[in-house]
Amino acid sequence: MKRKAFTLIELLVVVVILSLLAAIVVPKLTGRVNETKIKTTKVQLKEIKRALEMYKLDNGMYPTTSQGLKALVEKPETPPAPAHWKQYLDNIPKDGWGNDFVYVCPGDKHPFELKSKGPDGELNTQDDISVWDQ
């Protein structure tokens, strides 16, 4: 007699095995994804910081808060006008979670504050990533 189908027990065993594998693999992959987003965000912060430093070298000041990071891509129209502006970045990147970076100049403890809101997307929480914390 030839078997044409799986028994219910065989199917249940396969489902249990797949569930166990998923329970082991998925959390590891999820942690890696978040780790990668954090690393990517830190690299982007360093690159923006480098562009801000170049802006200051050329113009004697950092962009103001109202000029924002956009001043690294297009010449600011709001005062103070930069004397020797150049394009410092091709575009303003988003953090690893697709959010805009937060830029404030002057900062409280540093010449400027540049940070990501982190995984939760909320500002001033424990998971914020600052360019100065690296």
Image (cartoon, rainbow, N blue to C red):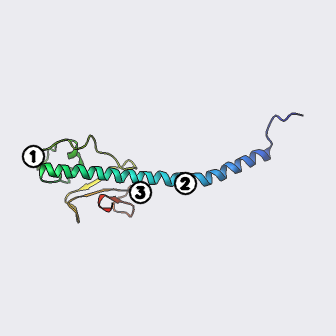
- Dot 1 crowding, Cα within 10 Å, few <14, some 14–19, many 20+: few
Task: Give the amino acid at mark 1.
Answer: Ala
Please provide percent x and percent y for residue 68.
22, 50
Query: How many angstroms separate mark 1 from mark 3 (CA)?
Result: 39 Å
The reply to whether discs 2 and 3 touch (Cβ–Cβ < 8 Å) is no
- Dot 3 crowding, Cα within 10 Å, few <14, some 14–19, many 20+: few
Q: Quadrant of the C terminus?
A: bottom left
Query: Which mark's residue is nearer the viewer, 2 or 3?
Result: 2
Q: Which residue is mark 1?
A: 83
Please provide percent x and percent y for residue 129.
35, 58
Task: Give the amino acid at mark 2.
Answer: Lys
- Tag shown at residue 22: none
Say what secondary structure mark 1 lies in.
loop
Of mark 2 and mark 1, the one earlier in the sequence is 2
Q: Nearer the viewer, residue 34 or 103?
A: 34
Please provide percent x and percent y for residue 44.
33, 50
Farthest residue, direction bottom:
109
- Tag shown at residue 120: 3
Query: Which mark's residue is nearer the viewer, 1 or 3?
Result: 1
Say what secondary structure mark 2 lies in.
helix
The reply to whether discs 1 and 3 touch (Cβ–Cβ < 8 Å) is no
Q: Which residue is mark 2?
A: 28
Task: Give the amino acid at mark 3.
Answer: Asp
Please provide percent x and percent y for residue 90.
26, 40
